[in-house]
Image: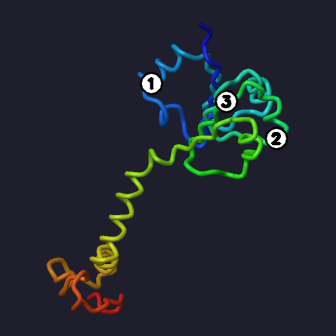
Amino acid sequence: MSKLNILIDPLPRTMEMIFDAQARRRLSDIADLTIFDSGRMPAAMLEEALPKAEILIGQSDLPRERLERATRLRAIFNVEGNFLPNIDYQYCFERGIRVLIASPAFAVSVAEMALAFALDLARGVSQADRAMANGKRRMGSPVIEVSRFSPAAEPVSSDSVT
């Protein structure tokens, strides 16, 4: 059984960010890898490797003209978590090339950050920190008199933080 041919152009990520050592070994066992992990893959390298590639892992520019030469390509794994306009998605759809996205891998981190921001805004953490850094608040003074989650809470302006 022949190995898959995988082209890896991980920018803006790196191989270490995408694969741990064990996953990389497993990938090497099942596939012949063409990897460029020090910036954007040079166009000449991409042009040479793409016609043999069955899978591309990365964010490479793939206009229709380039995709037409990628006759074996079956899947593109977008490593950034968005759908940049650098791929001819219509052509991929027509040819059955799956374009997959890594954004579910970021879901927990994004949810945690959103919760942290909400708590910061609700409790005035950053505002109190800035007030203390600017000498407007002393250690031990009350941070918030009434919980901002309470219906009785009054909006706190930056002027009232002392």
* N-term mark: 3 or 1: 1
* Vertical placement of residue 130 versus 26, above or below: below
Q: Residue furthest top?
A: 1
Q: Which residue lies furthest to the right in this view?
A: 65
Mark toward the viewer: 2 or 3: 3
User: Neighbour class for label 3 at 10 Å: few (<14), some, many (≥20)?
Assistant: some
User: Neighbour class for label 2 at 10 Å: few (<14), some, many (≥20)?
Assistant: some
Q: What residue type is labelled 3?
A: Arg
Q: Residue at x 73, y 45 (%)?
A: 87
- Left or right of 35, for residue 132: left
Q: Which amino acid does label 2 sit on?
A: Arg
Q: Mark 2 points at which residue?
A: 64
Q: Residue at x 48, y 23 (%)?
A: 24
Mark toward the viewer: 3 or 1: 3
Q: Residue at x 63, y 25 (%)?
A: 35
* Vertical placement of residue 92 versus 111, above or below: above
Q: Quadrant of the N terminus?
A: top right
Q: Name the residue under label 1.
A: 23
State the image coordinates of residue 135 (x, y, percent, origin top left). Answer: 29, 82
The local secondary structure at tag 1 comes to: helix
The local secondary structure at tag 2 comes to: helix
- Left or right of 139, for residue 30: right
- Left or right of 41, for residue 43: right
Distance from disc 1 to disc 2, alpha carbons, whole Å, reads 31 Å
Distance from disc 2 to disc 3, alpha carbons, whole Å, reads 15 Å
Q: Residue 153 carries which label?
A: none
